[in-house]
Image (cartoon, grey):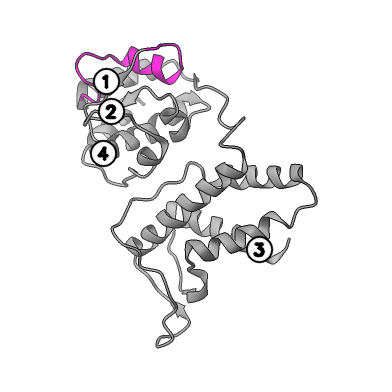
């Protein structure tokens, strides 16, 4: 493993730690880089491999590690230059780590997808039902929080997810609550990812905009307003 590959590995580990809410210890200022610096590292990483097939396999592996991570957007970016007036190892707040992770993650996803040919043969497996209790669960959720607009049913929602309907569906809750709901129902399906849900291209937000992978992934919230109500439905069904 060369130096650039190790740097990419360390960046991915950092992103996963931030996503999982792990405590981030003090890190060297040099760890926090600009997109331009990241591009230089990626260029060195890409030329390291002996052939194109080896490169694509490694990029695909790294892409799969981060494709379902998401970070709440925070206005501004806290990391640009090293501050020589303070010690080398620095401590940043959760909001600052989310801001940095949002930028770096978005850039890595963009570059990896371009290298993989705009996701040709990625996410080709469609979502299928693993646990038939999902209909009962979604019915109870819709009664509790009315996450679907009144002219749509839980059956419609499942049909959209499993690509068995040409119908389009409109949500009645904001994206943060919908993202949380998706993370809770994941275990009831095979091949279920936030990206796969967005790639149905048939789900519209409460505001009427078509949900895409980026805006849905970045809607992640640990404590959306309907969290307790959603959790209650899941707990009662167990």
Seen at 39% across and 29% down, the residue is 185
Seen at 31% across and 46% down, the residue is 221
**Label 1, label 3: how far apart the Cα atoms are:** 49 Å
Seen at 45% across and 28% down, the residue is 199
Seen at 42% across and 36% down, the residue is 213
Mark 1, secondary structure of its residue? helix
Q: Earlier in the sequence, mark 4 or mark 2?
A: 4
Residue under numbered circle 3:
4
Residue under numbered circle 2:
233
Question: Where's the N terminus, which quadrant?
Answer: bottom right
The span shown in magenta is 146-166
Q: Earlier in the sequence, mark 3 or mark 2?
A: 3
Residue 227: mark in rendering = 4
Image coordinates of residue 123 in percent, x first then y, are 55, 30
Mark 4, other Cα within 10 Å: few <14 / some 14–19 / many ≥20: some
Q: Is residue 155 magenta?
A: yes
Residue under numbered circle 1:
140
Q: Is residue 238 magenta?
A: no
Mark 4, secondary structure of its residue? helix
Closer to the camera, 51 or 88? 51
- Which quadrant of the figure has residue 154? top left
**Label 1, label 4: how far apart the Cα atoms are:** 15 Å
Mark 3, other Cα within 10 Å: few <14 / some 14–19 / many ≥20: some
Mark 2, other Cα within 10 Å: few <14 / some 14–19 / many ≥20: some
Q: Earlier in the sequence, mark 1 or mark 2?
A: 1
Q: Earlier in the sequence, mark 1 or mark 4?
A: 1
Left or right: 186, with 4 as reference point: left
Image coordinates of residue 60 in percent, x first then y, are 63, 42
Q: Earlier in the sequence, mark 4 or mark 3?
A: 3
Closer to the camera, 230 or 9? 9
Closer to the camera, 206 or 81? 81
Mark 3, secondary structure of its residue? helix
């Amino acid at each position: 493993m060369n130096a650039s590959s190790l740097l990419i590995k360390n960046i991915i580990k950092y992103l996963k730690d931030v996503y999982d809410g792990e405590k981030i210890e003090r890190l060297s200022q040099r760890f926090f880089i600009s997109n331009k610096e990241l591009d230089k590292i990626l260029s060195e990483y890409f030329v390291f491999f002996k052939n194109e097939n080896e490169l694509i396999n490694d990029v695909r592996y790294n892409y799969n590690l981060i494709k379902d991570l998401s970070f709440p957007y925070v206005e501004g970016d806290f990391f640009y230059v090293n501050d020589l007036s303070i010690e080398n190892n620095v401590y940043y707040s959760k909001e600052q780590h989310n801001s940095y992770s949002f930028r770096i993650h978005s850039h890595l996803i963009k570059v990896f997808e371009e290298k993989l040919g705009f996701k040709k043969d990625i996410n080709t497996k469609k979502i299928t039902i693993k646990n038939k209790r999902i209909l009962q669960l979604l019915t109870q959720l819709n009664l509790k929080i009315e996450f679907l607009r009144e002219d749509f049913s839980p059956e419609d929602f499942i049909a959209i997810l499993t690509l068995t309907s040409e119908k389009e569906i409109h949500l009645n809750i904001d994206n943060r609550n919908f993202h949380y709901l998706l993370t809770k129902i994941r275990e009831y399906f095979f091949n279920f990812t936030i990206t796969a849900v967005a790639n149905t291209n048939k789900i519209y937000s409460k505001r009427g905009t078509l949900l895409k992978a980026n805006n849905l992934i970045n809607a992640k919230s640990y404590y959306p307003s309907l969290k307790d109500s959603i959790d209650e439905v899941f707990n009662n069904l167990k």
